[in-house]
Amino acid sequence: MVALACVVSCSDSSQGSGPSSVVKTATGGAITVVANDLYFDIGTIKTSPGPLTATLVNRGAVYHTFKIEGTSLYLKTNAGQSATGTVTLRTGTYKFECTVPGHAAAGMRGKVEVG
């Protein structure tokens, strides 16, 4: 009984696999990504080809970054701050991640689907 209770009460879908399965679509070429401690609030960003303005809001206790691989977009924020940048994307799939050592491996990563 105790083991079963822990399985039920110890699982938390708001972290771990929860945010990595969240899909958001950019509206008007803009998206907001929230960084918490060791996870983003989103796993997949869908957008159209062209400019994408991304805002990183840091709700964590340490600094975080948001980097879309293969592009010049690199945002860095301290705890409680936000940063915004724009990049032009072509059709395809791009990976994004927090470049702070260990953060991407802990789950702070996802993808941008442009199409």
Image (tube, rainbow, N blue to C red):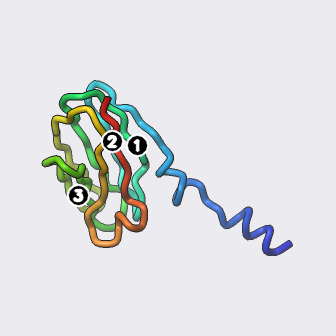
Residue holding disc 3: 77
Q: Is residue 56 left or right of residue 40?
A: left
Picture quarter with the C terminus: top left
Badge 2 crowding class, 10 Å Cα cut-off, few under 14, some 14 to 19, many 20 or more, is: many
Q: Position of residue 79 (x, y in %)?
A: 29, 62
Real-space Cα separation, disc 2 to disc 1, in angstroms: 6 Å
Tag count in the figure? 3
Q: Which mark is residue 112?
A: 2
Residue holding disc 1: 44
Classify mark 2: helix, strand or loop: strand
Q: Amino acid at mark 1?
A: Thr
Residue depicted at 42% across the width and 47% down the height: 43
Q: Position of residue 91 (x, y in %)?
A: 26, 32
Q: Amino acid at mark 2?
A: Val
Real-space Cα separation, disc 2 to disc 3, in angstroms: 20 Å
Q: Amino acid at mark 3?
A: Thr
Given the current orientation, which residue lies at the most extreme bottom position?
2
